[in-house]
């Protein structure tokens, strides 16, 4: 057979029976079923055919067996380039028409019937349209995968195909296509000398040896009888029958088959005489003269082997060898030697003759295809078992992710069991010290770090594998230059062979090495062991990487828990603080200040230590305490905890949160929020105002992401980094003992409350506000509907944003002072960004920011549209819009005095008040007597102002 023919054949003995492993596993995942016995019989039937006539019969019988409802099957085979011919009755498929157009689509099709004119009379009853409702005509093209053409076509009349029928036909089509390709290849190459004897050659050879036609016919009857008995799916059973036949034909005491492994490195024997070995015997292919038989494809006798080979064969057979004949058996598909047929001790003390050799060749002329196909099937079955074993291994490994040592011990046990190795060792790569570390051995886990075993990561066999990342299969350890036999000499242990493979993580980085020593049921580790180790190492790598990650996550959780405990300890509110806050009772808001409930009031004028009590007063005045039966001690502790949860940046501190909460109270008192929202929504809004900037660090979301902070790692994938952190801190306070002000809520209300707080706090991200602004405007244009839950949700977001920016609705001095605080915070962030090597935005850069222009832009594009929209929805909010507009106008008036970028050297904008005070003295503005707490002299501050 030429190289081209071998390419066409492509190891047909391996393909003609079963799917490749990846196709088989994909089929299993997709259909969750196994091949039926009928399908297996059909595949074996197809595998055995070597001529077109037998193939037609096999195709017809296979379809009838798989589809019991089949009424007729018409088989067309390709002849030449385009002719599709059938022999029953002899006719050609029309080159044009419906059937041919379906065939040209190269996929199976079922329909209600085929055109009568395109069918021979024999098949019109079962295939011609129109068919009864319960019958179908199925057109099945069998494809030549290399040429992408139909090599055969089946027309089938049957019932509608079920899912199981479709599954079986999918598999049958693949194997039928291979069988058709094989038969076609054999037909085109029949004129060339076959690589193994054909029946005709065998006959001619026997005639040359003076074997009569009568004897040859007897031989044919015997071989046909043997072929009829070769129906087993077990290769050992088939070998028994073939070996018994050979013993009878060659008059030998004992025969055996030495099978050649696929990697051509080993010979193995499963059956000797009439006995199936419990464990197959294997030995190197280059064992004496046997390797030359495989290479040269010429028979040998006892006289051709050495005394040592003779002794080993005698040991395998259990008897003394007096005569021997070893004949190579070649695959008729590939021409490669797949087995050595050996006959020992011819009866009568005679030597084996040339007739015996040809009798053996004649036998395998008929049986080699079935034998190799069954061996391929057995290999697939073994692979299936190994895959199932690997899946069980994966299950076992992934149940021990919590402890690396236990996981490594499990890896050692599983690796030993899978490969039948005597010893297994696993090393992890320590990248810091560049060493391979083993603290888990066959005997158990070493707990003492002083006893753990360390070797340099670039020395020895394990070091070589760790460095190269390649598997290393050493068949003779003592002859390998990397093996150090000093340990064997000192312990008395003998290392025969080693299979060492890398363990890699999902990034294909080596994280460890596993070393298997001494193959127990063979001379060394074979190619199958290498493939198994490669697959096993993937599971090992994933499980070890995830175990180490699990450990790091666990440690991070402990550190986080400790940090949270420490934070809560420093935020802890003592019983004395709670008692001190409540000792005077809740003060009515009128006693805090007569204008406390008016939009003109500036809450920043209050001393810092009185703000928690003011929060309690607002809770009481809005009726939340009575409505929701909030425990006073719990509420006081919650307020104090929230106050302590704020850091002290210039602007985003507790006083900002208090001012925002107070503005929410003002909206409730002055705009009648109860007419627009449910009570639970108003409570959620007020609590969100208190908590909306918890643990603010004085930097924004973009800084968290750019600096790759812990917060960014936690929340950047979800967006709104800081807002999500604020909400998480609020939940942490609520979960603190004695701080849950919602503990009297039922499960439904409690869940809704937390959802509302989350949504409202996330709404403080101006990016969120800009995303929903069009929807807010549409809601205002269409009219607000209190019964519409989406309307209430959007109104809550708008109210939260208006509370957050409420400093812009106060008098000029307040607005100006707030700008001073905001830009102090902005410029601090800009300085940090510069230190990181980044370029801050203009508003964060103290060398570029022109404050009046930035403030005017902010008011025109953010603040004023918000309060204008609010006034459209809640008419009483008009004065808020007007005050923001007045402040914007004042920024325009004072901008001519602002000749610098950033803040003055004293970080104060007080110089801008001169013109304002002049205009105020002329009565241009209303009163703005309320000073900023902590910003003006204490003499000017106080609750009474």
Image (tube, rainbow, N blue to C red):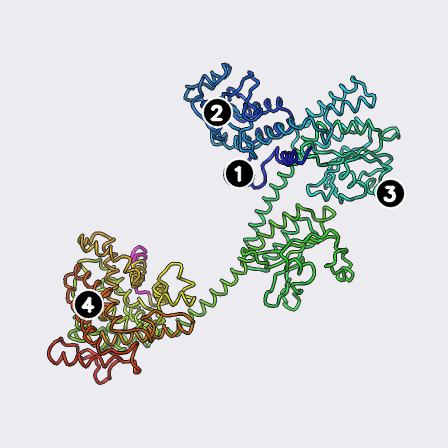
* Viewer can see residue 745: no
Q: Are marks 2 and 4 in contact (CB under 8 Å)?
A: no
602 or 10, nearer to the observer: 10
Question: Which residue is rendered at x = 45% and y = 17% of the image?
Answer: 116
Q: Secondary structure at mark 3?
A: helix
| C-alpha separation, residue under disc 1 versus residue under disc 4 | 68 Å
Is residue 773 found left or right of 41 in the rendered image? left
Mark 3 and mark 4 lie on one chain; the one further toward the N terminus is: 3
**Magenta region, residue range:** 740-752
Q: Is residue 596 above or below residue 300?
A: below
Residue 111 lies, in percent from the top left, at 43, 25
Q: Quadrant of residue 642?
A: bottom left
| C-alpha separation, residue under disc 2 versus residue under disc 1 | 30 Å
Label 1: how many Cα within 10 Å (few below 14, some 14–19, many 20+)? some
Q: Which residue is mark 4?
A: 666
885 or 277, nearer to the observer: 885
Mark 2 and mark 1 lie on one chain; the one further toward the N terminus is: 1
Q: Secondary structure at mark 1?
A: helix
Which of labels 3 and 4 is toward the front? 3
Q: Is residue 742 magenta?
A: yes
Mark 1 and mark 4 lie on one chain; the one further toward the N terminus is: 1
Q: Which mark is residue 105?
A: none
Q: Secondary structure at mark 4?
A: helix
Q: Are marks 1 and 4 in contact (CB under 8 Å)?
A: no
* Viewer can see residue 367: yes
Is residue 271 found left or right of 931 in the rendered image? right
143 or 757, nearer to the observer: 143
| C-alpha separation, residue under disc 2 versus residue under disc 4 | 83 Å
Q: Which mark is residue 307?
A: 3
Q: Which residue is mark 1?
A: 27
Q: Which residue is mark 2?
A: 100
């Amino acid at each position: 057979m030429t190289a081209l023919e071998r390419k066409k054949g492509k190891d047909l003995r391996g393909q003609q029976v079963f799917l490749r492993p990846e196709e088989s596993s994909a089929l299993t995942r997709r259909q969750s079923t196994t091949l039926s016995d009928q399908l297996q019989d059909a595949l074996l039937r197809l595998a055995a055919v070597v001529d077109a006539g037998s193939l037609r019969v096999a195709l017809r019988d296979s379809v009838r067996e798989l589809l019991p409802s089949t009424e007729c099957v018409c088989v067309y085979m390709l002849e030449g380039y385009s002719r599709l011919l059938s022999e029953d009755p002899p006719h050609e498929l029309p080159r044009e028409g419906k059937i041919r157009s379906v065939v040209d689509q190269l996929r199976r099709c079922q329909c209600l019937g085929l055109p009568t004119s395109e069918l021979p009379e024999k098949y019109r009853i079962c295939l011609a349209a129109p068919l009864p409702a319960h019958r179908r005509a199925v057109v099945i093209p069998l494809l030549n995968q290399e040429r992408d053409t139909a090599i055969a076509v089946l027309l089938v009349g049957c019932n509608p195909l079920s899912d199981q029928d479709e599954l079986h036909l999918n598999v049958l089509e693949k194997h039928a296509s291979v069988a058709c390709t094989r038969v076609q290849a054999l037909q085109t190459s029949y004129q060339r000398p076959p690589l193994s004897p054909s029946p005709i050659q065998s006959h001619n050879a026997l005639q040359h040896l003076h074997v009569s036609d009568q004897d040859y016919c007897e031989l044919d009857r015997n071989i046909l009888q043997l072929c009829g008995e070769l129906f087993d799916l077990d290769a050992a059973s088939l070998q028994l029958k073939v070996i018994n036949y050979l013993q009878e034909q060659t008059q030998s005491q004992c025969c055996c088959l030495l099978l050649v492994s696929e990697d051509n490195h080993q010979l193995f024997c499963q059956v000797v005489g009439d006995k199936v070995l419990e464990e197959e015997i294997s030995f190197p292919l280059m064992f004496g003269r046997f390797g030359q038989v495989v290479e040269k494809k010429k028979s040998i006798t006892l006289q051709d082997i050495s005394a040592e080979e003779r002794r080993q064969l005698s040991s395998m057979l259990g008897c003394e060898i007096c005569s021997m004949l070893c004949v190579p058996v070649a695959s008729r598909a590939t021409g490669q030697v797949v087995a050595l047929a050996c006959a020992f001790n011819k009866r009568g003390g005679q030597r084996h003759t040339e007739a015996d050799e040809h009798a053996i060749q004649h036998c395998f002329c008929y049986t080699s295809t079935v034998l190799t196909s069954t061996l391929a099937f057995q290999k697939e079955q073994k692979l299936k078992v190994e895959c199932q074993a690997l899946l069980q291994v994966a299950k076992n490994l992934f149940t021990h992710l919590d402890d690396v040592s236990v996981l490594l011990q499990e890896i050692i046990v599983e690796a030993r069991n899978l490969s039948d190795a005597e010893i297994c060792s696993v090393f992890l790569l320590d990248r810091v010290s560049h060493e391979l570390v083993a603290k888990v051995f066959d005997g158990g886990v070493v707990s003492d770090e002083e006893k753990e075993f360390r070797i340099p990561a670039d020395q020895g066999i394990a070091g070589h594998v760790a460095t190269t990342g390649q598997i290393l299969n050493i068949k003779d350890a003592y002859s390998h230059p990397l093996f150090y036999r000093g340990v064997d000499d000192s312990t008395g242990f003998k290392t025969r062979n080693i299979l060492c493979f890398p363990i890699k993580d999902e990034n294909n980085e080596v994280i460890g090495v596993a070393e298997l020593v001494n193959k127990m049921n063979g001379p060394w580790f074979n190619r199958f062991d290498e493939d198994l180790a490669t697959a096993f190492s993937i599971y090992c790598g994933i499980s070890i990487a995830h175990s180490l990650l699990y450990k790091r996550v666990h440690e991070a959780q402990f550190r986080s828990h400790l940090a949270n405990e420490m934070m809560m300890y420093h935020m802890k509110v003592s019983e004395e603080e709670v008692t001190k806050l409540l000792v005077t009772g809740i003060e009515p808001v009128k006693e805090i200040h007569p204008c406390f409930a008016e939009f003109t009031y500036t809450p920043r004028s209050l001393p810092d230590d009185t703000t928690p009590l003011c929060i309690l007063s607002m809770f009481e005045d809005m009726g939340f305490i009575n409505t929701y039966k909030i425990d006073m001690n719990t509420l006081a502790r919650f307020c104090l905890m929230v106050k302590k949860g704020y850091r002290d940046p210039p602007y985003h501190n507790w006083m900002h949160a208090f001012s925002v909460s107070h503005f929410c109270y003002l909206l409730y008192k002055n705009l009648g929020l109860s007419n627009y929202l449910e009570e639970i929504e108003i409570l959620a809004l007020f609590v969100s105002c208190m908590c909306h900037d918890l643990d603010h660090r004085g930097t924004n979301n973009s800084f968290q992401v750019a600096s790759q902070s812990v917060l960014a790692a936690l929340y950047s994938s979800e967006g709104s980094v800081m807002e999500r952190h604020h909400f998480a801190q609020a939940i942490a306070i609520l979960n603190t003992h004695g701080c849950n002000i919602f503990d009297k809520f039922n499960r439904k209300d409690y869940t809704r409350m937390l959802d509302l707080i989350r949504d409202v706090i996330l709404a403080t991200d101006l990016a969120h506000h800009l995303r929903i602004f069009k929807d807010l405007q549409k809601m205002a244009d269409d009219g607000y509907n209190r019964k519409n839950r989406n309307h209430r949700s959007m109104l809550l977001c708008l109210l939260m944003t208006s509370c957050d920016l409420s400093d812009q609705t106060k008098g000029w001095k307040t607005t100006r002072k707030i700008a001073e605080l905001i830009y102090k915070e902005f410029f601090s962030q800009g300085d940090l960004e510069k230190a990181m090597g980044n370029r801050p935005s203009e508003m964060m850069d103290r060398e570029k920011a022109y404050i009046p222009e930035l403030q005017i832009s902010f008011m025109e594009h953010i603040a004023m549209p918000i309060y204008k929209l609010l006034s459209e929805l809640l008419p009483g909010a008009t004065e808020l819009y007007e005050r923001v507009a007045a402040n914007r106008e004042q920024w325009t008036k004072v901008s001519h005095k602002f000749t610098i970028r950033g803040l003055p050297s004293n970080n104060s904008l007080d110089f801008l008040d001169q013109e304002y005070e002049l205009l105020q003295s002329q009565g241009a503005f209303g009163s703005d007597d309320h000073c900023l707490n902590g910003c003006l002299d204490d003499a000017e501050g106080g609750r009474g102002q």
